Image: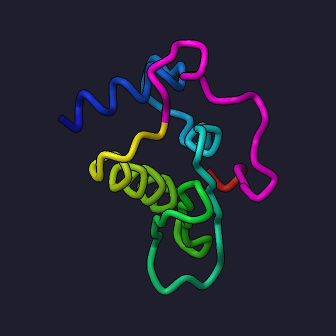
Amino acid sequence: MAEKQAMRLLQILGQTGPAVDVSLIAELPRIEVRVEPKLVVSGFSQWNRGRWLLAVNRDDSLVRRRFTLAHELKHILDMGMPIWTERADQMRPSPRRSATTSLPVF
């Protein structure tokens, strides 16, 4: 199941090989990514105002932040909550980035 989810997500994000750009996760519909200092955990995900909030601890290393973001997204996928639609014209992330997302940390 995880491999199928990963392959589908890579297809949607237009990623074809290693060194996946995890910052693209923030461009998915109904996803907001925040990188916050001084969290007591590495990260968390929660449903908030009609979208998923994924928070990542800014104080963790780059490798840990990348892992945490992907890990939190997997929690959402495992709950069976759709983050994309099946319509081909709506599957690609939007070209705009969320103003609340600090993408250079990934």
Of 17 and 95, the residue lying toward us: 95
Of 18 and 56, the residue lying toward us: 56
Q: Is residue 81 left or right of residue 50?
A: left
Give percent across and percent down for residue 27: 64, 39
Q: Residue furthest front?
A: 50
Q: Residue furthest top?
A: 88
Of 15 and 33, the residue lying toward us: 33
Of helix, strand and loop, which mostly describes the magenta segment?
Answer: loop
Q: How many marks?
A: 0
User: Is 86 covered by the magenta stretch?
Assistant: yes
The residue located at (27%, 49%) in the rendering is 78
The residue located at (64%, 66%) in the rendering is 35
Determine the image quadrant of residue 91: top right
Residue stretch rendered in magenta on the structure: 84-103
Identify whether 24 is placed above or below 99.
above
Identify whether 85 is placed above or below 35.
above
